[in-house]
Amino acid sequence: MRPLRIIAAVAAVLASTFAVPQAAGAAALGPRPDFRLPYACNTVVALTTYNGHTPVGKIDMYKVPGPQTGVPVLASADGYIHETFSPGGLEIAHGGGWFTVYLHMTGVRGIGNVKRGDVIGYVGSVGTGTAHLHYEQLANPNSTTNGDTQHIVIPVIQGRTANPTPSGPFNMTSTNCGGATTPPSTPGKQWVDTFADAPGYSSPGGTRTGTLYKGTNYVYCRAKGPKVQVGSAWNTWWLKTDLDEGNPWQGQWVSAYYLSRWGNDVAKDNDGNDIVNC
């Protein structure tokens, strides 16, 4: 288990209906799943790495052409999201000792079953300076419930060994064409797009506590608070959410001024529904 901010751990798997064996003892490694690029069907993706990006097998992915921020990230294969962690990451257990890891995302999907092609987050720059997707495949012959850094292997994606070098990046076209789904409308959460990093506060207009990164994020509810205005744009609504970084980071507030789809003093989700009042 990665020693980072863990939202849920392997124990949650026990409640799942996904057929991942629960024993953590010695087990033969199962066949490698048919992993696909974690991007929408027919998207061209650059697979890159750099000197010092160790162990071998870690890949940084970029959509070709850009921009990168906000591009949906899809599950490479069927599985169970058994943990989420900083920076903007999650790990999927695929059964047979196989796992995938995805980092630097916004709108990270929560614990639960996923099918190949389901949206699990959005490309972002959480914990890094440049928006991209960090991707890993892991193989742990001794556990079907957790993979860690020492289990990273050179990925095989769409039947091709994906082992770029610093001087030899290459492009691939996604065959992840299973019909992606957006994150489910979890009770108590609504999805919104923000156009810039938004400062987070302990209460509407209260003490600064952290930052919500730009991109697609969930919010819990809205409340009126101090007016935030830049030029002619303004908003008096505040949104309760979980920040990407900060202390504390859970249950904090950002101004609805940062919503990218709506005008002055409007607080709606991406489907055009009013965000529920707190």
Image: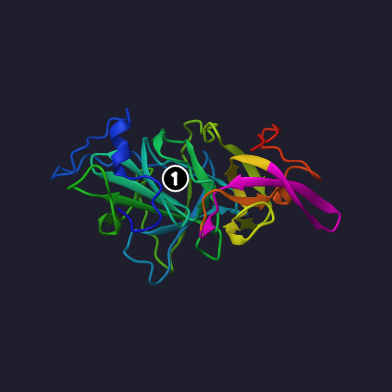
Please give left or right for residue 258 compared with residue 119 in the image.
right
The location of residue 124, given as percent across then percent down, is: 55, 54
Residue with the mark numbered 1: 37
Figure quadrant of the C terminus: top right
Please give left or right for residue 202 compared with residue 75 in the image.
right
Q: Nearer the viewer, residue 222 or 217?
A: 222
Please give left or right for residue 60 compared with residue 78 in the image.
right
Reply above or below: 244 against 77: below
Instruction: Give the residues in magenta.
Output: 223-247
Q: Amino acid at mark 1?
A: Leu
- Tell me the residue at 44%/52% (across/down): 89
**Crowd band around label 1 with a 10 angstrom C-alpha radius: few (<14), some (14–19), many (20+):** many
Q: Nearer the viewer, residue 174 or 61?
A: 61
Q: What secondary structure is the magenta-colored segment mainly?
A: strand
The location of residue 117, given as percent across then percent down, is: 46, 36
The location of residue 87, given as percent across then percent down, is: 46, 57
| Residue 238 covered by magenta stretch | yes
Q: Residue placed farthest to the left in the image?
A: 26
Reply above or below: 207 against 189: below
| Residue 254 covered by magenta stretch | no
The location of residue 231, given as percent across then percent down, is: 85, 58
- Tell me the residue at 38%/67% (across/down): 53
Q: Residue placed farthest to the bottom in the image?
A: 51
